[in-house]
Image (tube, coloured by chain):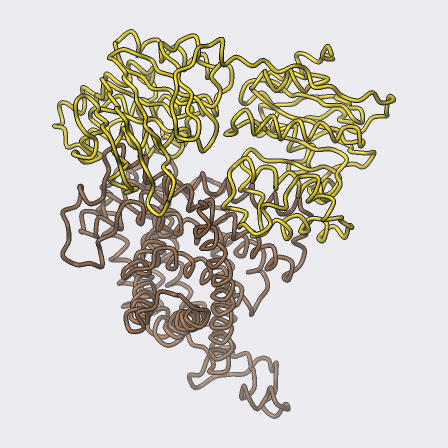
Chain colours: A brown, B yellow
Amino acid sequence: MKYQKVDTVIHRLNPFTKLLYSIVISMLVVLLKTPQELFILALATFCVLLLARPNLTRLRLLIYTVGIVVIATSVSQAFFYYFEPRTVILTVVNKNFPIIGRITGGIYLYKEGIIYGFIQSLRILSVMFMATTVVISTHPSQMIIALDKVRIPKEISFIIATSIRFLPHMIEETKRIWTAIRLKGFKLNNTSNAIKAFRYVLSPLIINSLRQARLVALAAEVRGHSFHESVPKRKNSLLRFDTLELVTISFFIILLYVAILPFKMGLSKIPFIQALFFSIPFTCILLIGIRMVPRPGSATLIIVGHSLFTQIISRGINPLWWPYALLEAVILEGYFAITKDYLKSRHAFAIAGILRGMSVYLYFYFVASPYIWHKFYAPWYIVIQTSQGVLGSVLGALIAYRVSKSVEEAYKYGGL
Amino acid sequence: MIKIENFSYTYPLSKSPALKEINLTINKGDLVLITGPSGSGKSTLIYCLNGLIPHIFGGSLYGDIRVEDIEPKTLSISEMAKNIGTVFQNPEYQIFMPTVKEDIEFGCRNMRLNEENIISNRNRASFDLGLNGLLDRETSELSAGEKQRLAIAGIYAVGPKIIIFDEPSTNLDAQGESSFREILEALKGKSYTIILIEHDIDTFEDQATCKYLMEEGSLKIISSIEHKSPHGKFVYEDHDEHGVVIEAQDISYGYNSKLPLFKDLNLTIRKQEVVAFLGDNGSGKTTFFKLLMGILSPQKGFIKIGGRCVRSINDSAGTAGLLFQNPDEQLFASTVKEEILLGPKQLNRSCDYEEIRARFDLKRYENSHLHSLSKGERQKVAFASILAARPEVIVFDEPTTGLDEKSWLSLMDFACLLVKDGVTILFSTHNMKVANRYAQRTITFDKGMIVQDEISKS
């Protein structure tokens, strides 16, 4: 999704009003219960979206995504439906089947589950329509102004604005680096090659980002933007970042966005093991970022900044995503505060990876799914997905450890 | 006015000074050109003038440095910016706001000028820098030349009477350079004091009132006669006529389907030719290289390298090697050896590392991290790693960008020596010194058309 420059009544609305609209819809998505209420909500958000006049390509893509969401939710809930009465319409694995049957208690497709899933998918559709409306009708810089009005810390609005500004440049650079690795003869035709190439690509990506962050920070300073001068000094040391640290964090936010793009495009098509492949690049870049700005608050700024950044430019402001980011940030900050160790050793990286993976996936399956999206999953499925998420996060953390060491070596010998 | 007397500076954790006993006086309205190789201390001198040293970098300063009678260390960087503005090499990194208007105002707002002053300063800067018609445009949509004018406007709007330009010609084509010369003349006409930092003294020599050479932290005044060092034509060994190695036939390609850049382009290049591709930014040089390397696919026609049709990167990998403008985008390992062996390993080709190491004199870098080397050295390693896969064709995209003369001479001399081993070399450049020295043939593009294709005189 991207901002669409047209003149509509929605475009003319104050961005703060659109921010309020996002919050209200998100609350209704959680609170409404009956199919009728959910249907009206989805219909209403869709009508508002039409008022923002999405172009044909976007509308086509949206219809395609709606189809996928409805089918995926209906099918998943058809398998995991556990309310009674329920009618089996297909047996995939019988409960008496050796090992798998015993572990899963049998895998059946329930008629009532399909209907339940279809109704619950209306919640996701409402959020999608709301998010699309806000993203296509609000220029990112307007949304930052609206967020400023709700008094988010200046540091966060600065890193989001900087990330938005340098995103196109970084995407181009990432493309060149991927081209360069392919010119070396790397073929990205299988998962193992893709992971190997990812590891190699990380080093130039990180080192170039650090070099550029320094140039950008110097340019900001000579244009009078010294962060400490523009923001009155805070007593709270958590928010006492200088311009270079904030610009570096912004570049890591962009890297987080860019690094998972190829995984989103290719590897996420592989069903069932998405959690593994998403966790590797995300955890890896996140932990390298924290290692490069090793101080209280940097994990929070990267995680919360990335969450808001992706919401502003593509996913749409959605308060339902905020607890994820905050929980992940609080857990990592807590770990660093207790150990007073900002990823100095391999085991510190690995533990941070485990904590990150567990907090995100357990929150999703035990809080977000049942209480926000009203979706249910079987215990065996939760165990498999969470294990994948944790494993992916640990793998990402170990790659991060290796790359960080290499980057620090470059620093040590006077490079960068 | 700038007055520097017996000034020395040492970076923190460094034992030797980066600037040694500098003496320099720059009067109002002067246009001073400071040249010198990479790492000689030019940027350090800029940082000392605008206050980044010591406020950001720290370190030890000795002697006296005054800008408009102010010691930079006594004012904050933003206060200093009102007296001395700095336009860095790459405008991309100094544009912060989403629209042209907001970006020109960015510095004024940081300095907390009142709204009336902000608007009048913005209007003055946009008028003087020719950005009046672009005020509402998004900064991401600007061309390279427009971005440079915007970077200057952002500094100019704040109102400093001294402006430093750090290697302004690096990303400019002939048109951009001529436009920049006009800006310099206009600033001179308004009695601005200008300090130009350039690798290449020839570019703005005629406009400078005074020229200095920085070498190993020392600054000395130079006369144009003393510095001029024209390079002769590179001498290639005679070789027999060879067959065609690159064949582009009826190529059509456009980023916008309604406006094709290439239309039925035909071009053949013979083995062991050294061909310079000339033309302004956007004329099609880089796009042609991308098509050649399989990074882009032609919408019509075909390109063959060594008789093999190139449809994707997989077809060109190993057969043709591309050296990027920025070597850091193609260095993946942390050691020289790992980097050199990476390509051949992926392509299942043998590689005599010892031979490559000896040929490129890489032994002394073996224990260093690749990214701790200078840009010229990193460029050399990137080149060695391409050569390790033994490609038939080597393509250089603007090989002189960001390199001082000594570094690009060393790189290109070395590359052209490979011609006797059967290698074909293509390079794009805005630098006529490189084209005149090395090209056996020059091809000039203009809006996707070959407007000139000639064999250079030996």
Residue B161 x, y percent position in the rendering: 23, 18
> Taking the image as drawn, is residue B302 in sight?
no
Position of residue A290 measured from the top left corner of the image (x, y, whole percent): 37, 59
Q: Is residue A269 above or below residue A337?
A: above
Residue extending farthest bottom: A96
Q: Is B6 situated left or right of B40 in this image?
A: left
The image quarter containing residue B107 is top left
Specify the quadrant that holds the C terminus of chain B: top right
User: Which residue does the image show at 50% across and 29% down from the upper left?
Assistant: B402
Q: Is residue A236 above or below residue B31?
A: below
Foreground residue among B285 and A87: B285
Q: Is residue B452 left or right of residue B177?
A: right
Please report the residue visible at 75 percent of the width from the left and 38 percent of the height from the top: B391
* x 63%, y 90%: residue: A97
In the image, is B370 to the left or to the right of B207? Answer: right
Q: Nearer the viewer, residue B199 or A149?
A: B199
The image quarter in which residue B258 lies: top right
Seen in the picture, residue A410 relative to A363 is either above or below; the reply is above
Numbered-mark total: 0
- Could you tell me residue A90's position as x and y percent? 59, 80
Q: Is residue A196 above or below residue A358?
A: above
Of residue B329 and residue A148, the one placed in the foreground of this image is B329
Q: Nearer the viewer, residue B395 or B290?
A: B395
Name the image quarter holding residue B377: top right
Residue A380 image offset from top left, x and y in percent: 50, 82
Q: Quadrant of the N terminus of chain B?
A: top left
Q: Is residue A416 visible?
A: yes
